Image (cartoon, rainbow, N blue to C red):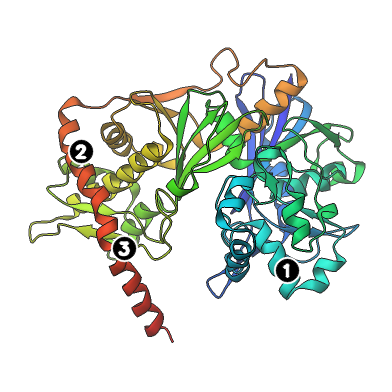
Amino acid sequence: MQAIIAIDVGTTGTKAALIDRGGRILASGYAGYDTRTADGSVMEQDPRDWWAATCAALAQMWSAAPPAEPAAVALSGQMQDLILLDEQEALGPAILYADSRATAEAAQLVDLFGYAKLTRITGNEQGPSSVLAKWLWLRHHDSTRLDQARALLLGAHDYVEWRLCGSRAADFTTASTTGLLDLRANRWAESLIEELGLDAGKLPPLLPAGAPLGTVTPAAAQATGIPAGTPVHKGCGDLGATTVGAGAGLPGRAYGYLGTSGWIAASLDQATPKPAQGVFTLRHPDPARYIQVAPMLTAGGNLDWLRGALADSDPLAYDELNRLAGQAPPGSRGLIYLPYLAGERSPFSDPNARAAFIGVSGQTTRAEMARAVLEGVAMGYRALGDGLGLVAGGPLLLTGGGGKSAVWAQILADVLDRPVQVLVDPGNAPARGAALIAGQALGWYKGYLPAGDFFPVAATYRPEPDHRAVYDELYALFASLYPRLKDAFSGLADVAANTQR
C-alpha cells in the first residue's frame, strides 16, 4: 500500500501523518516547541526546534503505522516568518508572523511608497507582521546577522523541506502573505525590495505547490526514518493546505476555521483585493487562483478565557460550558458579547479593541454568559462572511476544534442562516490538504475534489427558522457596538499603559 507522509509545521508544534489515497490517516504523531516572547512584540522560534519536533513526530507516527510504502513527502506550515540561513544552518531565531516589533518600519514603508501603491502591488495592508517590514527592521537593528545570511526562507515548512532534501523554495500562498510578492504578476516585487536597499537575490525561487523539490537525503533519512530517495514535493502555507484539505479548494465552496483564532475563506478564480474590509487576498496553491480570507484574531480563545473566568479553581470542562449554553435561549436574554479579547483584524483592524458583555442584569446567570460568548463569536463570523461577500444560503464547511461543540455549530448555522457541515477529524485538514496536493502531482487525483469520501462530514447543522428573527435583530445591535465603543477602547488602552509604567 502506498501512502503520503504529510508534515504540518504549526505555530505550537509539528504534526506528522501517514495518509492513504482515500484521505484516511493511517497513523500520526505530534511534538511541540516553545516560542520566545519579549516586550509584548517579539515572537521568535528556533528553526532547529522545528526540525527536532519533525523527527519526534515522525518517530511517533512510525511506531503506530501499518506497513506502507511512502510515495512522497508533502508539507504545510506557518507562513510569514523570516528565517536567515547560512550554508549549513539557520542563523539565529526565526521572526514569526505574529511578531510586531517592526512598527516603525511598517510606517516607513507607507511614508515611502504610499498606502495605495503598497496595497496595489501586494494586494494587502503591510503592517508590522509584513516580512518586508521585518526585513527592513533587521537591516536597522541586526545588520551583522543579515549580512551573514546567504539566503532567506519565509515559512516553517520551507525550512523543514530544506533540511529534508537540501533545496529551498517558496510557494505562492506563503509568498503572498509577506509583502514581497507582486500579487497580480505572481513574482517577487523586486522594485519595492531594491528601492529599500535589500538584496532580492537572497529570496528563494518561487514554485507552485506540488512541484518536485528533491529527494530525502541519506542524513535526513537517518534522522526521520523516511527512506532515502523518497520524493519531496513543494508544500504550501497552512492556510492554503487547510483550504484544500477542508474541501474548499475550488471556487464556490466556503469554509470556516474555528480554533483559538479563526477565519472564513473561499477559493476564487478572480479576486479584487479588499484590504479596507479586513479581507486578505492570497494566492491559491494553484497559482492561477486566489484565496480570500477574513481572519478573526480570537475565536475559540474566548471560550478558553470563559472557562477560567467562571471557575473557582480548575477551568470548567468544555462539556460543562456547552451544557450551560444549552440552558439559555437564543439571544441570551438580551446579553451580547464582543469577542475582541486581544484586538481584532477583520472586518476592522484595531489592536485596542477589547471584549465586553453588554446587557448584564441582576438576573444574568452563567448560562446566559456561556451562550452569549458562543453567540458573540458567531456574530463575528457573520461579519467576516459579510466582508468576504459570501453568497447567501450555501453551506459552510467547518474545521477546527470548535466544531466538536454541537451547541456552537447550531448557533453558527442559526446566526449565519446557512447549513454548517462539521468535517470528520477537522484538526488534520492541513495535513490532508498537503497530501492531496502531492497526490495530484503523483497522478493520484485529477483535482482538488477527489472522488469518493475524501472529505467526510461528521454532522450537518441546519438553521432553525424560529431563531432567524432573534439573531437578525441581535446582529444589527452587535455590528453597531464597536463604532460606538472605539474611542472608549482607545482611552482604556491609554489607562492600561499608564498603570503599567
- The answer to whether residue 5 is visible is yes
**Sequence-earlier tag: 3 or 2:** 2
Residue lying farthest to the left in this orientation: 362
Between 403 and 420, the residue placed more toward the observer is: 420
For image coordinates 16% across by 46% down, the residue present is 332
**Sequence-earlier tag: 1 or 3:** 1
122 left or right of 417 in image: right
Q: Which x, y percent locates residue 195?
A: 76, 60
For image coordinates 69% across by 68% down, the residue present is 137
Q: Residues within 10 Å of mark 1 (few under 14, many from 20)?
A: some
Residue beneath label 2, please? 471
Callout 1 touching callout 2 (CB < 8 Å): no
- Tell which tag, 3 or 2, sits nearer the viewer: 3
11 left or right of 214 in image: left
Between 185 and 282, the residue placed more toward the observer is: 185
Residue beneath label 1, please? 138
Q: CA distance from mark 3 to mark 2?
A: 23 Å
How many marks the image carries: the answer is 3
Question: What secondary structure is found at the residue carrying circle 2?
Answer: helix
Q: CA distance from mark 1 to mark 2?
A: 48 Å
Residue beneath label 3, please? 486
Up the image or down, 489 lies above or below 209; here it is below
For image coordinates 75% across by 56% down, the residue present is 193
| Residue type marked 2 | Tyr
